[in-house]
Amino acid sequence: MEIKYTVQGLLIYATIIAYLSAFVTSLLRREKTGHILYLFGFAIAVFSFGYRWYHVRHVPLQNLFEVFLCLGMIYPVSLFCRRILRVGGYSADMLIGAIVLFPAGFVFNAEPQQLPPALQSWLFTPHVAVYMLSYIIMAKATFQAILQLAGKGPNPNENLLPPEQATYRIICIGFPLLTLGLVLGSYWGKKAWGDYWGWDPKELWSLASWLVYVGYFHFRYMFGKKHPRINSFWAVAGMAAIIITLLWVNLSRLFPGLHSYAT
Amino acid sequence: MNKFRRAVMWVALALIILLLFLSVYGAFIGAARAKGFISRLPLVVYWITFTLLLITALVMFRRLVRVPGLLLIHLGCVFILAGAMWSSETGHKLQKKLFGIDKITTGQMIIFEGHSDNCVILEDLKQIKKLPFSVELDDLKQIKQLPFSVELKDFQIEYYKTAYLHIQTRDGQGWRIPVEIDTEFPLGSEFGTVKILKTFENFKITIEGGSKKIIDDPQPGSNPALEVQITSPEGQVTTRYVFERFGGHTRPEDKFALSYRRVISDYISRLRIIKDNKVAAEKDIEVNHPLSFGGYHFYQHSYDAEAGQYTVLMVVSNTGLAVVYAGYWMLCIGVIWHLWLRHIVARIKLKNK
Ligand code: HEM
């Protein structure tokens, strides 16, 4: 763990502080101030991402540092879920934003890298961006699943969905993105390496994550809301598989694979 | 749901969970072993069962056919599985037996600059310790010929403009300095400063009039190097040559090791396909930009790292690929329609009413 004494580092820390202050303020029932702080944090997160983009001169989604920087821009997803999907967890999103920025601020190496030939493709940005968006959406679904498991529900006067339904609704938004990420990755693999499926660990973990959600859909079709806890368990398992896909394969160096450029 | 349908769903769920565990297992054993594992007989049975179950479901659950999104999703999965099986090694063998189509599934070609060849080595070159041309080519039984030749007009490696001098001290401290001529770079009071004086594309030492002379040789060849001036904290100045290809040795009195690294931005093979003594196709292939001809795709796979004289291409049959891609389209359109668009359209309709 190290502190980054750079402009980039300071921007990340400022975002984390804004998100955490927004979270605490919301818990103290000062929703309006919380919202303003959240919006302020988001503005710094966007600036921070743009700053990185300018600095490295390519879309900054090449390594874990950049990917987590991108995940920190969670605000539009929160807004979309609350306004359009009637799904809560708005305050928790502030915490999720701070949590995902933590490794970018303190753990991952921020040294800019030049793009190796394999990553110079129009597929690079859509493939990674779609995955990041789906991951953040699935993180929201997991929070709803945890609420369901904990037996908590939204305030009746908030006009929000109960957690079990909310989980399903968010997974319905995230799953097409996850599918698109998988398919774009496969198409890209074919263009770059000649194989649309290479059976390397990163691919297999992303397939496993996708299959957890496929399992979720069919289990929920078979039993509906009869076993809400098992439904929620699927969603939590999906997130666990996503975290492993994103982190473990890169960090553990346990598996020899093609995706070594992502370390 | 009647009993039979429920049974189908249970089997489907079991197969999905099984595939999930197989994927995790595959991730643990690494790509090379996973590739072998998935084409073993029990797995072949698994793939066929999964495909048949999807088809059974399409027949048994009316909604899977009537609801367009669900049809696209499940039929898409059938296409992907069928296309993948058809394009596999076993699929190719089956096509040879059934229809007499004898195609190379995948292999590699080594082509020297200015030469053409139609030989495809079916073994993975990385698995062969000696390079194939240092043994007799005939020794490799696993060679097949394409019905046309591939000519390598030129092979080129391009580098990013910015190259780096890496400095590593004995206690693990490190710097990465962009190569800029005559810019002094301070390394702190303990190590002094470094300055890059000159870059070489093709470093050579010649003897002229009995004395050694260092030149950047304009003749063909490549030996990238840097001339670096080190000034110690005591003011002592030394000059060092740092080579990209050869890691220099550190002397006991050296406080740090130097290395010169350039980052490759592209590999380009300028190819020409020759069929019946005529040029049938031409393309400069790069990573992400393969050449497609005669039922095969040609990829930039590897190269001669020593002298840049030859390229290694990967040749892959395109059999079954269109079916897999059709499946991808169906699956993507299916999930987007079924889980997103359908609801948006319904909302708009409701609003208009
Ligand atoms: C292995 C055999 C499979 C069977 C027997 C099967 C069967 C079914 C059935 C019966 C439904 C419910 C349809 C309805 O709403 O009336 C369904 C829904 C669905 N299936 Fe499958 N399926 C299989 C594999 C797959 C796979 C591999 C995918 C991968 C994408 C998939 C994705 C979906 C999705 C996204 C839904 C919609 C879920 C929802 O609307 O909540 N299925 N499937």
Image (spheres, rainbow, N blue to C red):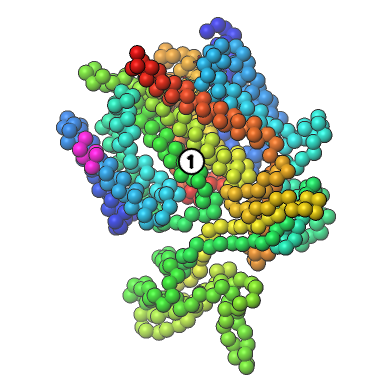
> Where's the C terminus of chain B, which quadrant?
top left
Q: Mark 1 lies on which chain?
A: A
Residue B343 locus on image (x, y percent): 41, 20
Report the residue at 54% width, 28% height from top.
B331
Q: Would residue A95 appear left or right of B343 to someone viewing this image?
A: left
Q: Is the magenta stretch mostly helix, strand or loop?
A: helix
Q: Would residue A248 appear left or right of B135 to someone viewing this image?
A: left
Residue B205 locus on image (x, y percent): 60, 82
Amino acid carrying label 1: it is His
Query: Does residue B225 sit above or below A172 in this rendering?
Result: below
Q: For this rendering, which residue is in front, A134 or B273?
A: B273
Q: Is residue B301 visible?
A: no
Report the residue at 32% width, 28% height from top.
A81
Residue B229 locus on image (x, y percent): 44, 79
Q: State which region is magenta.
A: A35-40
Badge 1 is on which residue? A127
